[in-house]
Amino acid sequence: MRCVTVDIPPAGGSGRMKIAENNKALPMDRVYFIYNHYAGALQATASPTRVFPVDRYVVGMEKTFLDGRWSVEARMPFASSFLFATTDFDLGNQDVGNFAVSLKRLLCLSDTSAVAAGLVIDTPTGSDVTGQIAASRFVLRNDAVHLAPYLGFLRAPNDFFFYQGFLQVDVAANGNRVELAGDALGKLTDQNLLYLDLSLGRWLCRNPSAPRLKGLAGIAEVHYTTTLQDADLVGGASGLNFLQLGNIFNRIDVVDLTAGLHAEIGMTEVRVAGIFPLGERPDRLFDSELQVSVNRRF
């Protein structure tokens, strides 16, 4: 009997919505596009071990209401399809991610700082994960709704520096059905996660009255993700074939560093950044990441 371990790409490989990604602790009127390239994001420990990249594309919009104190944001991700196959095992998914809606409330605002809170609702519109062990098909359904309350702050103490942070808890409201050879094995519940994200920026040049390039800043960020409870595992057998799904490493603590440039060109903001994980697997979800985001204010 051969054992094969494969990373599962959930919700079309797009993952859950992090409020700190391409966001501010301020209600805004904007449309945006995000591109992420994750090198070494998925790993299969067949012989030999293989790693696969993931490309993700996100379109979104945020609109303020009630005199700018509130905003609602809608975000739709897509990701490159994934397929891993050997002679007696395969695993894959499609490219549609989970549609997410975020509600943001401005709690306090001054000339130099802001505090906001809100809730992200991540809905299961993404693709299921499907695979086969020998002649037995299995499916991990994408059923879970995720609720993720958050708190954020933003501060610009002078004309040169600005910084912000977000604290977010991601909770699975229900589990995902697991089926093997047409039989239900149970429900796999995603682990609840805690996100802590801090960002520091320094304006290299800034002229708000300029017709084109209004500002250019360097950005440095640290991102921390940890699991809040032990992993759920679901397993079952079909003939001589055994399947087990879940986080076999149980708890993880992931720390990533980000460095990039942020440019303001008219009503458009463009950011290009590289993300570098500090840990080793399993506390390392990818080898490196390139992120490009474009925001258009209105």
Image (cartoon, rainbow, N blue to C red):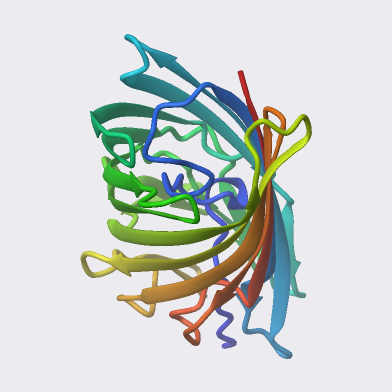
Name the residue nearer the viewer: 260 or 185: 260
Q: Is residue 269 left or right of residue 201?
A: right
Residue found at the far top of this picture: 66
Q: Quadrant of the N terminus?
A: bottom right
- Residue 186, x across and y down, in percent: 32, 52
Q: In which quarter of the image is the C terminus?
A: top right
Residue 136 in view of the camera: no
Residue 230 in view of the camera: yes
- Residue 267, x across and y down, in percent: 67, 27
Residue ID at (51%, 31%): 99
Is 153 located above or below residue 250 in the figure? above
Q: Is residue 238 left or right of residue 165?
A: right
Name the residue nearer the viewer: 32 or 84: 32
Is 207 located above or below residue 54 in the figure? above
- Residue 88, x across and y down, in percent: 70, 73
Numbered marks: total = 0
Name the residue nearer the viewer: 98 or 163: 163
Q: Is residue 133 left or right of residue 17?
A: right
- Residue 11, x across and y down, in percent: 54, 46
